[in-house]
Amino acid sequence: MNDSQVERIMNNPKFQEMVSKKRRLSWTLTAIMLFVYVGFMLLVGYNKAFLASSFNGGVTTWGIPLGLGIIVLSFILCAVYSYIANHKLDPLNEETLKEIEAIAHEKGTL
């Protein structure tokens, strides 16, 4: 791939839309995970009594399901990212590449 093709890709509106959507999605999911994780750490630091208390009168404390919930949330957020990337972002990327290839074939530069 030569510099002119890279420049055409970078200036393509669909590619710019894909980059914008990907950036927004990544930062949103990162903020969600960061909020939950920092909230859990603050809970550990400032309310240990709550985490050590039993939620059903047995030996299982609140800390266990909350900690497992954070792990499950990370898998869910990864699945959400993968789904959106595969069904929304990849088609935009493919359309961009097809447009660039069509232009290159017209100009005979490919």
Image (spheres, rainbow, N blue to C red):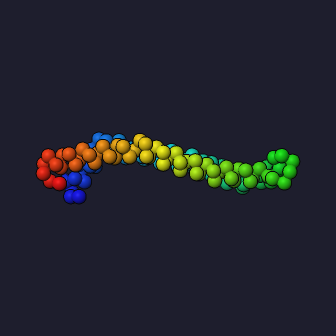
Q: Quadrant of the C terminus?
A: bottom left
Question: Residue 16: image x %, image y %?
Answer: 33, 44
Question: Residue 35: image x %, image y %?
Answer: 60, 47
Question: Residue 69: image x %, image y %?
Answer: 67, 49
Residue 27 visible, this orientation: no
Q: Nearer the viewer, residue 88 or 44?
A: 88
Residue 13 visible, this orientation: yes
Q: Outermost residue toward the right?
A: 57
| Residue drawn at the location 30% of the way across and 43% of the way down | 95
Q: Quadrant of the N terminus?
A: bottom left
Position of 2 with respect to 48 (left or right) is: left
Position of 42 with respect to 57 (left or right) is: left
| Residue drawn at the location 29% of the way across and 45% of the way down | 96
Question: Residue 43: image x %, image y %?
Answer: 71, 51
| Residue drawn at the location 14% of the way across and 46% of the way down | 106
Position of 13 with respect to 70 (left or right) is: left
| Residue drawn at the location 18% of the way across and 49% of the way down | 104
The number of numbered badges drawn on the structure is 0
Q: Outermost residue toward the left?
A: 108
Position of 28 with respect to 90 (left or right) is: right
